[in-house]
């Protein structure tokens, strides 16, 4: 059985391609979870090329994975995994709120129209997750921001488990995406998301203040490794993720 996945232009990362987190979450939403489970499975998504915008990608099952292709080439591959992403230690909401004033993207941003972290996106259009530095964890500086999901972030992908209005699964993945790039110092090293593993325990409640925390976890050649965790207003983990970023030539995005 084949299906289609479309990344609407609203959910761009770079101007001409999909936000990696949103695309990964949209593909993860097509992975059939265990119907007996109380939460979504942990899913690892590998991004092989920039996701096209407003263009149908073919989605099919292949060797136990859910694979999105375009023009015969693999764009993204999602698989259920057993290992759990690292949890980044929480940051008090007041500290996260204050840190946003030091968001590096306010000074220089490689992709200002990015759905998750773009400074050119209006309130209610983009997520506007503007994370700044806070305290250290294991010798590495964490970054944090507060985020209040807008009603427009609930859509056809939403999987409701109670009567509360909640953001969609792709938006939840997007909220965990770019903060990893900024934790890995996106100002000094232009990177794009190459892989993301996420565990979603609950979808974020629309209108409720959440805290997103990111952490750098090292580099290896062109790769940078980061993690991010989303907390609700009561300090409970909503979702957590690990990322693999790959450094790219800035000329490819000019």
Image: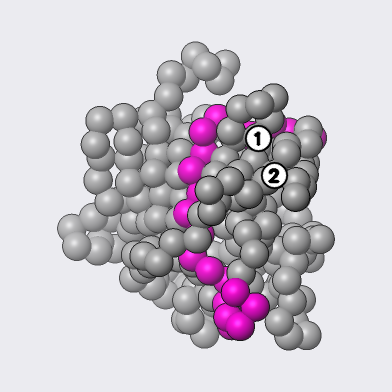
- Going 40% across and 55% down the picture, which residue do you hit? 242
Please check the rendered image and state whether residue 55 is part of the magenta-colored stretch, yes or no: no
Measured Cα–Cα span from mark 1 to mark 2 = 6 Å
> For residue 39, what is the image quadrant?
bottom right
Residue behind mark 2: 59
Q: Position of residue 118 (x, y in %)?
A: 61, 42
Label 2: few (<14), some (14–19) or many (≥20) C-alpha neighbours in 10 Å: many
Q: Position of residue 229 (x, y in %)?
A: 44, 65
Residue behind mark 1: 69
Find the magenta span and give its range: 34-54
- Going 80% across and 61% down the picture, which residue do you hit? 155
Residue 190 in view here: yes
* Main secondary-structure element of the magenta-colored stretch: loop
In the foreground, 232 or 225:
225
Q: Secondary structure at mark 1?
A: strand
Q: Residue furthest left?
A: 139
* 196 versus 34 height, above or below: above
Label 1: few (<14), some (14–19) or many (≥20) C-alpha neighbours in 10 Å: many
Q: Position of residue 35 (x, y in %)?
A: 65, 78
Q: Secondary structure at mark 2?
A: strand
- Going 28% across and 55% down the picture, which residue do you hit? 141
Residue 88, numbered label: none
- Going 40% across and 66% down the picture, which residue do you hit? 82
Quadrant where the C terminus is found in the figure:
top right
CB under 8 Å between discs 1 and 2? yes
> For residue 223, what is the image quadrant?
top left
* 227 versus 94 height, above or below: above
């Amino acid at each position: 059985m084949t299906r289609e996945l479309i990344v609407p232009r609203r959910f761009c990362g770079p101007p001409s391609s999909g936000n990696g987190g949103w695309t990964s979450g949209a593909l993860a939403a097509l992975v059939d979870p265990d119907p007996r489970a109380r939460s979504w499975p942990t899913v690892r998504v590998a991004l092989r090329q920039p996701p096209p915008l407003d263009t149908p990608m073919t989605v099919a099952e292949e060797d136990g994975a859910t694979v999105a292709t375009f023009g015969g080439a693999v764009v993204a591959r999602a698989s259920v995994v057993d290992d759990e992403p690292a949890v980044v230690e929480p940051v008090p909401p007041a500290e996260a709120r204050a840190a946003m004033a030091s968001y590096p993207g306010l000074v220089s941003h490689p992709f200002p129209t990015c759905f998750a972290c773009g400074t050119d996106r209006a309130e209610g259009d983009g997520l506007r997750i503007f994370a700044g530095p806070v305290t250290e964890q294991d010798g590495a500086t964490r970054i944090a921001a507060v985020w209040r999901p807008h009603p427009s972030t609930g859509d056809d992908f939403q999987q409701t488990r109670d009567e509360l209005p909640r953001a969609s699964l792709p938006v939840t993945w997007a909220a965990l995406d770019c903060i990893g790039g900024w934790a890995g110092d996106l100002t000094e090293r232009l990177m794009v998301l190459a892989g993301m593993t996420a565990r979603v325990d609950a979808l974020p409640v629309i209108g409720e203040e959440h805290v997103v925390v990111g952490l750098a976890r090292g580099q290896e050649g062109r790769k940078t490794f980061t993690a991010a965790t989303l907390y609700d207003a009561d300090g409970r983990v909503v979702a957590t993720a690990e990322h693999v970023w790959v450094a790219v030539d800035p000329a490819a995005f000019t």
